[in-house]
């Protein structure tokens, strides 16, 4: 019988040298939130969580009922533990402060509670994305500045994929590791240790219906992906429309995901803080690369909580070619 490793055991055995028990516990808090969200997701057709909630988030997007539940469960599991100094969520216009009655912690949590929520009603995979930073100044309880840090300051990030099975994949700077939720045990078990994005890439993920909005350089790049280059073989198109699901497939099988700047989203559509930076940290740990088409995502310092960015992420060679072709064809 193969050795069974729970996520709690793996986190304890592999926590970074600087980590105290509260960092390990924070990761396990996120795993607990994942279980709660997964339980609701699996029952989406049986309970009153399908459809829109009748409100919009700060992005101007209609909120799904499960969006709201996911946001609340993460915040409520993490706001009183003494592990965080501040939180920021895609669903909140302002930072989420830690209630005054609770101890301030040393870490910062940023998260997208339910990426791809427009897919909920048609039973397509959704996901949660999170990033963890250190508190910048221990003398302050938690400030906007603590959240507006570049990806190269992350000390942990990950995502939870709610699909045919529920997976939690995370990194703390020493490889990318995946865990699958065993519904019988109610526990995440190690299933994918030290994930490396395979070469060559196999899949290209992008919304071709937006071709008319793409710049010349992006169109040339998409054509290059479909036809292949001197070294790279042609890539097959696969696009789910759920960032976590598209990223997860390309992480395991190789490829590139892109959501470029375009006429209807001149600054890009994806959020730098909650989506692009945490996934950029992960892909670099797996041997890949993430760019906004001109520079590394990891080096971009956010100027506001809900800042948007273009995103090209996947195999390093494929993403670097995007930078070359976009620069040559403005």
Image: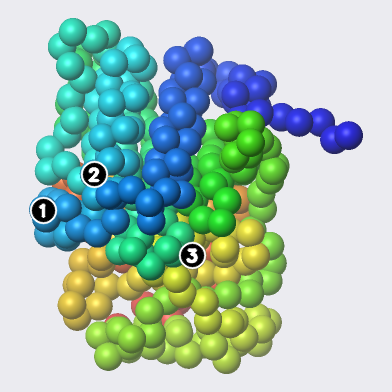
Which residue is label 3 attached to?
Answer: 246
Q: Horizontal and vertical percent for residue 224?
A: 52, 87
The reply to whether dot 2 and dot 3 touch (C-beta < 8 Å) is no
Which residue is label 1 attached to?
Answer: 55
Determine whether 173 is above or below 204 in the image: above
Q: Residue at x 39, y 44 (%)?
A: 40
Q: Is residue 51 visible?
A: yes
Q: Residue at x 48, y 19 (%)?
A: 25
215 with respect to 200 (left or right): left
Q: Pick whichever, 181 or 83, lies toward us.
A: 181
Q: Residue at x 33, y 73 (%)?
A: 260
Q: Horizontal and vertical percent for residue 161?
A: 49, 51
Q: Residue at x 33, y 64 (%)?
A: 121
Q: Horizontal and vertical percent for residue 207?
A: 38, 79
Which residue is label 2 attached to?
Answer: 68
Q: Pick whichever, 320 or 243, lies toward us.
A: 243
- What is the quadrant of residue 84 in the picture? top left
Determine whether 125 is above or below 102 in the image: below
For label 3, the crowd category at 10 Å Cα-Cα, with few meaning under 14, some 14 to 19 and many 20 or more, is many
- Of badges 1 and 3, nearer the viewer stands 1
**What distance separates the C-alpha of mark 1 from that of mark 3?**
27 Å
The label number, if any, that marks residue 1 in the structure image = none
Q: Is residue 292 visible?
A: no
At mark 2, the secondary structure is: helix
1 or 3: tag closer to the N-terminus: 1
């Amino acid at each position: 019988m193969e050795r069974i490793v729970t996520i709690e055991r793996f986190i304890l055995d592999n926590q970074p040298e600087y980590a105290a028990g509260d960092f390990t516990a924070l990761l396990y808090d996120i795993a607990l939130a994942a279980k709660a969200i997964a339980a609701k997701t699996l029952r989406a057709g049986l309970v009153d969580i399908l459809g829109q909630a009748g409100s919009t988030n700060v992005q101007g997007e209609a909120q799904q009922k499960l969006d709201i539940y996911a946001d609340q469960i993460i915040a409520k599991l993490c706001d009183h533990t003494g592990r965080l100094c501040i939180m920021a969520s895609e669903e909140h216009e302002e930072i989420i402060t830690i209630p005054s009655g609770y101890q301030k912690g040393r870490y910062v949590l940023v998260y997208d509670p339910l990426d791809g929520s427009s897919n909920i009603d048609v039973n397509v995979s959704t996901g949660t994305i999170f990033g963890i930073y250190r508190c910048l100044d221990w003398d302050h309880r938690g400030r906007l500045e603590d959240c507006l840090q570049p990806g190269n300051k992350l000390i942990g990030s990950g995502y939870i994929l709610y699909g045919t099975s529920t997976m939690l994949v995370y990194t703390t700077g020493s490889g990318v590791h995946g865990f699958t939720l065993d519904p019988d045990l109610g526990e995440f078990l190690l299933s994918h240790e030290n994930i490396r994005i395979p070469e060559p890439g196999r899949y290209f993920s992008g919304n071709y219906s937006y071709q008319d909005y793409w710049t010349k350089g992006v169109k040339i790049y998409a054509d290059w992906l479909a036809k292949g280059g001197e070294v790279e073989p042609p890539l097959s198109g696969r696009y789910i429309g759920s960032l976590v699901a598209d990223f997860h497939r390309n992480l395991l099988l190789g490829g590139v995901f892109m959501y470029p700047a375009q006429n209807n989203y001149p600054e890009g559509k994806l959020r730098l803080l909650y989506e692009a930076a945490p996934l950029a940290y992960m892909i670099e740990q797996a041997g890949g690369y993430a760019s906004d088409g001109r520079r590394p995502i990891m080096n971009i310092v956010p100027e506001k909580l809900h800042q948007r960015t273009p995103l090209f992420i996947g195999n390093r060679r494929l993403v670097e070619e995007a930078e070359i072709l976009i620069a040559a064809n403005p």
